Image: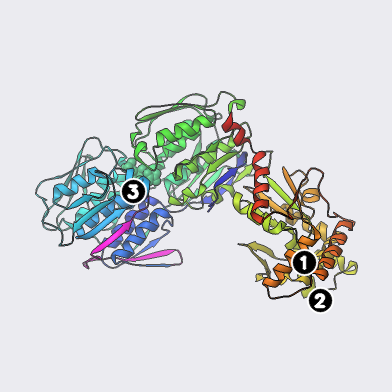
């Protein structure tokens, strides 16, 4: 997951390969609640692990359900006939699928509960559901604004006698989740009589009700659907765990990869994008996004649990579509519209205005930043793509804490102008798809501009390792600590009993080529063993310097180093990153500091490890090492001609990092575009 302030996606050109998608949010949270209301244990396979399911799981645990996770299976032991914890304050984040269904379930279980969420949750309506529950006789108060969370369910004395002799009426035109909530909770009350729910007004997002009914059936509740207007829960209903249940992958999440297949040229040797975990017989309504993508020109085939998507018609065809049945996936169509041959209109999407953000306004604003012309109405969005490649602009996409805005705008990186796209607050995808960007980067290839590389070269103890790591962290880029490759090679040579010198150059080069070296979460692993500390000793530093002076070894590690240049970008630290390995890097920094200053820093580092070294010795070692690195015949340490010199003798690490980041920002097109 990227938790950076922003994520810059370089211009992309093609895509190919296969993705396995995480579980459906809508199915996961329904299954969790139904399992909690059942007796016994339900084994849930492939449950979505994300912010939305975490708030549901936390709430269920607090209520008294047992939750155990082992090997990809979550086991929920339901409440059955036991009473839940009687007084609780529950935090629902921004999960509509937790907030609404739990409100109804808790109102029918009895107890004293407050339910709240993030600031945006307090702006998302819940009045229609509360009205329906009050009509039944439940005691629910608003703790803030009427009609919105936070709520208090005040039934410490137990559930009052419910008015079940007439249909429970609920409005269906703001969110289908109110009806879903009642359908999942009212079986608790359908003991000696049928319970009938009547929808007032037009029911929106109907396919989500279909998911609810399908899952209720799996848990033993057979609801009769009378034309989406009346729903009858039969007397004697009892939640029965199916024992084990599988969560299919999320069809809304699939929309980004279906769109990817439709937009991106196939990577060499590949035939489009293969999506696993969800397929043509999905119970999720958003699977019908496929039809919209096909209408725009995508070629889609598939089976019960997989899909394959290839670009066919190009440019895509503009469409005019009622999107009420695919409210979430339709946002992806708005970005596909950027690649269409005319104006696309998405209609009947008023509910977008009360979701994670006002999505009609958000999409219109952000699409305009890219150069599109948009027109929004109360319940529609009209999108005309940029007229020419030159009309596209590099944009920093504000994401409004809305996962779908972040995910769908990543697809703007295929723009014909070859511009990067900046996604602000990429972490917001954690609501439903924490690894979205990693999944995307595994199947896309950059445009000819390539994957950006920042090189930070400099002498020993200049602080380049620390600065490079922090720059990489701030940008969400990979890190190549090329020094560790030489350090690890030196260590491997010692372990193999080879003296480090020209006489063993070939053997050491062979070792370098074949050693199993991995960088994992800041640690360096050699043949699976953590050697992070072993390669940081003074001896290892000296060995590294000797090893790196051997031309055969340097040649052997070139391919290894080039392999680190992967999406979304790379920060490479070393001595010849800008001069030899990445000579075309768009930013090269030569980081240095006075010998006195570097010797003092080294002394402090050693002191922290309990080693007391003499400053004069350290300085002498350091200067000897500089001399060797600068005078070796292959790739001697020197500043690249086009490198920016940063002497950090008088700077803190933070100041040095800020300077490198500032230079990097100056090279990005976003600032200019926002100003213009
Ligand atoms: O029931 C569900 O799982 C959902 C219903 C839809 O909401 P509305 O009914 O408010 O459109 C959808 O947007 C949401 O992401 C999930
Ligand atoms: C509307 C959405 O979420 P929620 O379940 O919170 O309503 C969504 O995921 O697009």
In this view of the protein, can residue 268 be seen by the observer? Answer: no
Verify whether residue 646 appears in magenta. no
In this view of the protein, can residue 236 be seen by the observer? Answer: yes
- Image quarter for ligand 1 equals top left
Comparing 358 with 630, the one in front is 630
Other residues around mark 1 within 10 Å, as few (<14) / some (14–19) / many (≥20): many
Q: Are marks 2 and 1 in contact (CB under 8 Å)?
A: no
Q: Nearer the viewer, mark 2 or mark 3?
A: 3
- Magenta range: 70-96
Q: Which mark is residue 497?
A: 2
Look at 20% across and 51% down and name the residue there: 140
Q: Is residue 599 above or below residue 14?
A: below
Q: Is residue 278 left or right of residue 104?
A: right
Using the numbered discs, state the Cα–Cα distance from disc 2 to disc 3 in whole angstroms: 62 Å
Q: Are marks 1 and 3 in contact (CB under 8 Å)?
A: no
Look at 25% across and 39% down and name the residue there: 172
- Label 1: which residue? 489
């Amino acid at each position: 997951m990227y938790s950076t302030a922003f994520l810059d996606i370089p211009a992309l050109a093609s895509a190919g390969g296969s993705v396995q998608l995480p579980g459906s949010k809508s199915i996961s949270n329904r299954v969790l609640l139904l399992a909690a209301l059942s007796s016994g244990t339900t084994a849930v396979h492939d449950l979505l692990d994300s912010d939305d399911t975490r708030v549901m799981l936390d709430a269920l645990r607090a209520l008294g359900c047992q939750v155990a996770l082992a090997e990809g299976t979550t086991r929920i032991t339901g409440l059955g006939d036991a009473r839940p914890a009687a007084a609780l304050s529950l935090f629902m984040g921004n999960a509509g699928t937790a907030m609404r269904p739990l409100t109804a379930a808790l109102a029918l279980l009895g107890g004293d509960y407050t339910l709240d969420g993030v600031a945006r949750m307090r702006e998302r309506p819940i009045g229609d559901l509360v009205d329906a529950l009050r009509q039944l006789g439940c005691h629910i108060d608003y703790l803030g604004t009427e009609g919105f969370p936070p709520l208090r369910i005040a039934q410490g004395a137990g559930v009052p006698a419910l008015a079940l002799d007439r249909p429970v009426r609920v409005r269906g035109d703001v969110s289908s989740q109110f009806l879903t909530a009642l359908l999942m909770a009212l079986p608790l009350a359908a003991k000696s009589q049928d319970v009938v729910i009547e929808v007032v007004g037009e029911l929106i997002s109907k396919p989500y009700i279909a998911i609810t009914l399908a899952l209720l059936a799996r848990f033993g509740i057979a609801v009769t659907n009378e034309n989406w207007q009346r729903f009858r829960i039969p007397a004697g209903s009892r939640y029965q765990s199916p024992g084990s249940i599988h969560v299919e992958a999320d069809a809304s999440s699939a929309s980004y990869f279906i769109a990817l297949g439709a937009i991106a040229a196939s990577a060499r040797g590949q035939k489009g994008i293969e999506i696993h975990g969800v397929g043509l017989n999905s119970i999720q309504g958003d699977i019908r996004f496929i039809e919209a993508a096909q209408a725009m020109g995508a070629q889609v085939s598939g089976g019960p649990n997989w899909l394959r998507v290839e670009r066919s018609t190009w440019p895509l065809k503009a469409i005019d579509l009622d999107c009420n049945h695919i409210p979430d996936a339709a946002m992806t169509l708005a970005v596909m519209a950027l690649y269409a041959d005319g104006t696309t209109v998405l209609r009947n999407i008023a509910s977008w205005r009360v979701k994670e953000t006002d999505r009609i306004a958000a999409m219109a604003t952000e699409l305009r930043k890219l150069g599109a012309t948009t027109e929004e109405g109360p319940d529609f969005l009209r999108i005309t793509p940029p007229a020419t490649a030159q009309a596209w602009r590099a944009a920093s996409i504000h994401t409004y804490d809305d996962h779908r805005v972040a995910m769908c705008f990543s697809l703007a990186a295929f723009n014909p102008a070859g511009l990067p796209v900046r996604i602000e607050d990429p972490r917001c995808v954690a609501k439903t798809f924490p690894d979205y960007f990693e999944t995307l980067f595994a199947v896309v290839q950059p445009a000819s501009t390539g994957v950006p590389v920042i090189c930070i070269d400099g002498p020993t103890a200049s602080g380049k390792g620390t600065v490079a790591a922090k720059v990489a962290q701030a940008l969400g880029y990979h890190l190549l600590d090329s020094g560790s490759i030489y350090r690890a090679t030196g260590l491997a040579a010692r372990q193999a009993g080879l003296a480090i010198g020209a006489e063993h150059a070939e053997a050491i080069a062979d070792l370098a080529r074949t050693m199993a070296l991995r960088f994992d979460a800041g640690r360096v692993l050699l043949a699976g063993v953590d050697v992070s500390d072993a390669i940081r000793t003074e001896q290892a530093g000296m060995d590294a310097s000797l090893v790196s002076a051997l031309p055969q070894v340097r040649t052997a590690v070139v391919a290894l180093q080039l392999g680190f240049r992967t999406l979304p970008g790379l920060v490479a630290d070393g001595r010849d990153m800008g001069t030899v390995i990445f000579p075309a890097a768009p930013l090269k920094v030569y980081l240095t500091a006075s010998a006195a200053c570097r010797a003092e820093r080294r002394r402090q580092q050693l002191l922290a490890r309990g080693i007391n070294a003499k400053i004069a010795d350290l300085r002498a070692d350091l200067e000897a090492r500089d001399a060797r690195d600068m005078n070796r015949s292959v790739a001697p340490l020197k500043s690249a001609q086009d490198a920016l010199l940063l002497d950090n003798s008088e700077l803190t690490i933070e100041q040095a990092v800020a300077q490198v980041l500032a230079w990097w920002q100056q090279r990005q097109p976003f600032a200019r575009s926002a100003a213009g």
